[in-house]
Image (tube, rainbow, N blue to C red):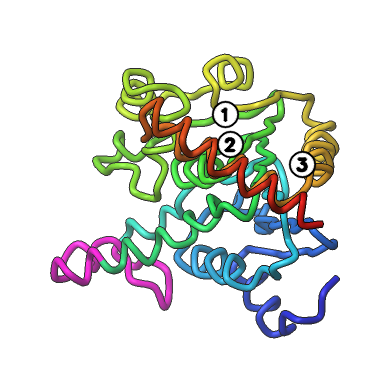
Amino acid sequence: MTTDIPDADRTAWEKAGVRLDLDGELATVTLCDPTRRNAQTPAMWRALAAVGRALPGTVRVVLLRGEGSSFSAGLDRAMFTPEGIPGETGFLQLAASPDAELDATIAFYQEAFTWWRRTDLVTVAAVQGHAVGAGFQLALACDLRVVAEDVQFAMKETSLGLVPDLTGTKPLTELVGYARALEICATGRRIGADEAVAIGLANLAVPADDLHAAAADLAAALLAAPRNAVIETKSLLRGAIDRTCDQQRAAERESQARRLRDLAGR
């Protein structure tokens, strides 16, 4: 456990429902509000964004998990009420704000969901029970997903008259294709473990009791490969979607040249 992160920060994050544990090159981020099924709030999003900024440069793999029976049941519904959450801007207030302020607030919320895609990290979500709305999008923010057999993904925003705005639309479309992504979002239906694996949402489904062991085994396998090779490979794969075949071939040559020179330099 590193001592570089102040205890006050850790305490504040846990109060918001997020815990960070560090073990060498592995970081484990836990949503730790199981009595509320890890419902998400702006405070949780601020904590998640802060955790991303605070990760030591030695971390290579981040494992995301949720305590209790649900990974995350989505947004705290109090955000929709006139009373809202004490100390937070409720959605009714947010809707009445000027355009620039509204845009900036949503962009700020999105920060909690963006750092998981950093090229220098491989991120793994271990997902059980409900992963709804914001919970679904947080799982989608990670590179890989291991799910329990009881998992229930659902994108409920459209059913509530909203859209998924926490960075989930791009990875969902990349994973399952436009037509299936539209159907999942527009209907808000639930996706179980078998379907999640079949359509590419999940890499692996295991019994609930084996979830965290399976995710830990995957993290260990990822850490076994040389760091710079993994970084280069992740960068190649993430960029492949937007490149032509010739551009991808050129990117492969450039990446391999860097690896060969690095290895020769040792």
Residue 51 percent coordinates (x, y): 61, 68
The CA span between labels 3 and 2 is 26 Å
What residue type is disc 2 on?
A: His
- Mark found first going from the N terminus, 3 or 1: 1
- 199 to 61, vertically: above or below: above
CA distance separating discs 3 and 1 = 26 Å
Cβ atoms under marks 1 and 2 closer than 8 Å? yes
Q: Mark 3 sits on what residue?
A: 222
Q: Could you tell me residue 73's position as x and y percent? A: 54, 44
Q: Amino acid type of disc 3?
A: Leu
Which residue does the numbered mark 2 point to in the structure image? 130
Dot 1 falls on a residue whose secondary structure is: strand
Q: What amino acid is at disc 1? A: Gln
Examine the rendering and report whether any part of residue 157 can be seen. Answer: yes
Looking at the image, which residue is at 59% across and 65% down? 52
Q: Position of residue 46 (x, y in %)?
A: 50, 69
Residue range highlighted in magenta: 82-103
Instruction: Work out whether mark 3 precedes mark 2 in sequence or the reverse, and give the earlier one.
Output: 2
Label 1, on which residue?
152
Q: Which element carries disc 3, helix, strand or loop?
A: helix
Q: Quick check: can you spot residue 73?
A: no
Residue 75 % position (x, y): 45, 51
Q: Quadrant of the N terminus?
A: bottom right
Report which quarter residue 184 is drawn in: top left
Q: Separation of disc 1 and disc 2 at Cα?
A: 5 Å
Vertical position of residue 69 compared to residue 2: above or below: above
